[in-house]
Image (cartoon, grey):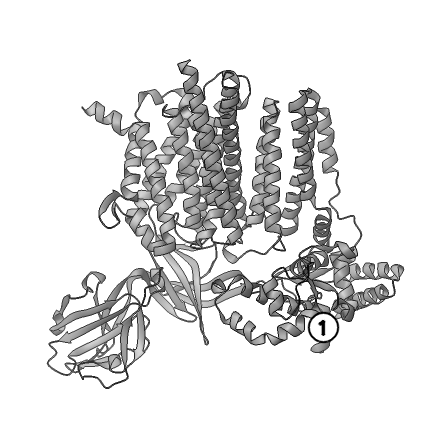
Amino acid sequence: MLKFLYNFISSPKIFVYTVLWLMILVFFGTLAQKDIGLYASQMKYFSSYIFLFYDYIPLPGGRVTLLLMTLNLSSSLFRKTLWKIKKIGVIILHIGGLLLLLGGGVTAIFSSEGNMVIEEGGKVDYTDDYHRMELCFVNLSLQDSLEYTVFDEELLVEGNTISYDKLGLEIDIISRIKNTRIQNRITEVDSVYKGFLKQFVLLPKEPEKENTQNRPSLIFRIRGSKNNADGIYGLFLGQKDLDIFNFKNEKFFSEFRKERTYLPFSIELLDFKKVLYPGTQVAKSFSSEINLIENEIPRRVLIQMNEPLRHMGYTFFQASFIEELKSESTVLAVVKNYGRLFPYISSIIMSIGLLVHLIINLPKMIKKNNSIKA
Amino acid sequence: MRFFKTLLILVFLIPLQSAYSFTVGDIPIQDEGRIKPLDTYARNYLLAFYGKRSIPELDLSATDWLLDLILDPAKGKNQKIFNIRNPEVVSSIFLDWSTDHKYSFNQVLPGLKKQTSLLKLIDDKPANTRTVFEKQLLELSLNIMRFEEISYLKSLKLIPSEISENHEEWISPFEFILNGIKPNEYQSKILNALQQYLASRMENDFIIMKSSLVDYEVALKSIPKNLFDIDNLKKERWLNQTNLFYISLAFYILSFMILGFNWMTRITFTRRISYALLLIGFFAHSYGIILRMIIMNRPPVSTLYESVLFVSFIVLLFAIILEYFRKDGLGIFIGAIGGSVFHFIGFGYAADGDTLNMLVAVLNSNFWLATHVTTITMGYGASLVAGFIGHLFLVESLRKSNDKAYLKSIFNSMFGVTLVALFFTLFGTILGGIWADQSWGRFWGWDPKENGALLIVLWQLMIIHMRLSGLAKPVDFALGMALNNIIVALAWFGVNLLQVGLHSYGFDDGVAKNLFIFIGFELIFSLGMYYLSKNNLKNELST
């Protein structure tokens, strides 16, 4: 029984079928990007274990397929027929391939990424997640510090009620809008609407294909303050003038923002430079001159296209920039990936393997008259 | 063999063009972000206006046309230089449709002026929502504007600016007059030489024309900073004029014709001639690629056009190696057909204008262009060669189904080339991942171009494993590699049609149509041949 199972899982046929299935996934996953955008398609077809075809039929996703392929490959390495000196190149090649798959697994599970937006002259010590949001309350009335209370993505679901225990408040999430249109109110409104919502309405609009181009917003009700802080509030991503409310003689404001991950150091942008080819609008290079500040000791670093900064397991890449009338901001992509060395090592191993195999076998193959089977 | 060695030496004796004297076509001009010879500049604009790189009807080269226009704008504006092929555009600017599609500046301008409000409307529309007519009308109005700017020297950025760094904009003679800029020492030297050249050209005084060009070169060499290499300008002008890729195409076609003669007559000597012609074509082809690398100081492939040139170079290289070992015409056949087809595709891309463009920031890395892009393009080339042998195998297994040894030898060549192809596509793809890891922080992002390359790798892995595990017979393998061509074409050109992701460059409807025709042809041909040869096999067994 066990032997049968082993023979089954290590069979080249399994490899052929998983590769075929992976090709189908890749093909349709690529076509789908035109309609649902790169991120959504990646989540559905490649980063999933199981996905639903036409909403009902469950099919194996990229992760299950690659897992099966890894099992198949690792078990096939134990086949006795493989371990011959003539096949040394093939063995090396497959070990390299296995490493590549394992590296992919490590990256898929453990890596994290986000970005960091810094204005010229500004200093930032956290990264923003690309997709996850958070609701944050800030207490402004403490003597020499700010107190942050943060509610995570998972809590910010329509219909959910969050209790803000410290202040004894209840927060009802009324609505979570993916992409927001902001419109002026025409008529006077009920006093239940607070701050920003007194003059504006937040309305949903057709979401963009790429999630990062959306402007999400959140509408929530605060209960239990026993004063006029009770009411409905609205917040959107990137809001400039935040509403301040009073509660128990302390001043608070709230913010709906991308989920932050704090770093053990901070980065200050000294200068962002964009060089164009003369007489054109085509960029020749982008670069950010920064100070990397750790334990209050600054170190000057230049980050540019194809030349990232690596520090404490984090890597900072020049990803984009924001040009405003008064100032420029740089956008750095920040990645922490424990699997990043795998492709480097495995590609070296694989190329050695394939080269060895080709050197042993190729001359026999391309000559016209011979009868050695490839 | 001695013949080839002599040939090889001869080819490398072609001087690297620095010994040529400085001509008016070599004058450096800054345009579209780079310093190019005036010859290239004139050719590109003439191509944009007129549709050709010279005016054969008047026996006028592009540079001559440009200089004539500058010296006598009044005459130039009456020259029928604008090629308008769309009757809708012609009637919209109140002109009568003529069979030669050519109109002069003075004919077009009044009509365009009447359509200013329409042009404004088109200009405000997002580029991807414009109709063909709107695009062409807008293009025409831009061309008219460019033409006028050339005619009074405004857009001719001929003079390096004072604070010359590499990304500083150059100054045109017109701007010196308009802004009253006082030229410094080398600037005035260049301006004087230019003035002298133009004046003597007006009077057809060839001696002074020559001496003023000598002055021009001296003036250029007196620029304290190293902004450009005069030798490279000369090389580029030489490359423009010799049309090396037309020469290589001619040799490939000739080689194919001689090979056909060889098949008919079976005279062994003709196969050698055919091989020699293929080699000569290949040398012209390689030399063209090498010159382009020297001129731009970058690796062979950085644009779609260059990928076409380089893939055909790889196809030829494989074909020549195959022929060297097999000596039966198979390699010549693949090389001559492949080389010719890719040259025609390449000419299609070159028709858009300058093929030596500057690169956007993320691509501007010679190390990664040299490693990833070159490797993956070699993979495309090797895959196509394997696919080509696959086609041949399918045909031959039908024609010579009894000659098992012959079929086996073709199969072995195909299998060998497939392994080489896998080597390049696999490592090209992994290197691409490593580049992405270096510049964007992720090894793999499921971007369409990445997925396209992955599809090729997976397909080849599958076919090879099917063969090794006995799931596929040689004829099935041949079918697999023949169909691999479709995947290569999709990965190479197809992903651009999706217009998503980081690699999306260069889209047009013509590509989509040709791609679908190609896929349809491949499917019908390969599956048809496969079906017939399977049937053949069955009949053989039953009788």
Q: Is residue B7 above or below residue B223?
A: above
Q: Looking at the picture, how far across and down is residue A333, in whole percent?
A: 39, 58
Q: Locate residue A215 relative to residue B175 in the image: left or right.
A: left
Quadrant position of the N terminus of chain A in the picture: top left
Quadrant position of the C terminus of chain A in the picture: top left
Q: Looking at the picture, how far across and down is residue A116, in whole percent?
A: 37, 63
Examine the rendering and report whether any part of residue A212 can be seen.
yes
Residue displayed at 33% across by 28% down: A12
* Residue indicated by mark 1: B174
Q: Is residue B320 above or below residue A268?
A: above
Question: In the rendered structure, which amino acid carries the disc numbered 1?
Answer: Phe
Q: Looking at the picture, how far across and down is residue A352, in whole percent?
A: 45, 32
Residue lying furthest top: B543
Mark 1: secondary structure: helix
Q: Quadrant of residue A2?
A: top left
Q: State the count of labels.
A: 1
Q: Chain letter of disc 1?
A: B
Q: Looking at the picture, how far across and down is residue A15, in whole percent?
A: 33, 32
Examine the rendering and report whether any part of residue A349 can be seen.
no
Q: Locate residue B393 relative to residue A95 in the image: left or right.
A: right
Structural crowding at the residue carrying mark 1, measured as other residues with C-alpha within 10 Å and reported as few (<14), some (14–19) or many (≥20): some
Residue displayed at 31% across by 39% down: A66
Q: Nearer the viewer, residue B275 or A218?
A: B275
Residue displayed at 56% across by 40% down: B311
Q: Nearer the viewer, residue B370 or B381?
A: B381
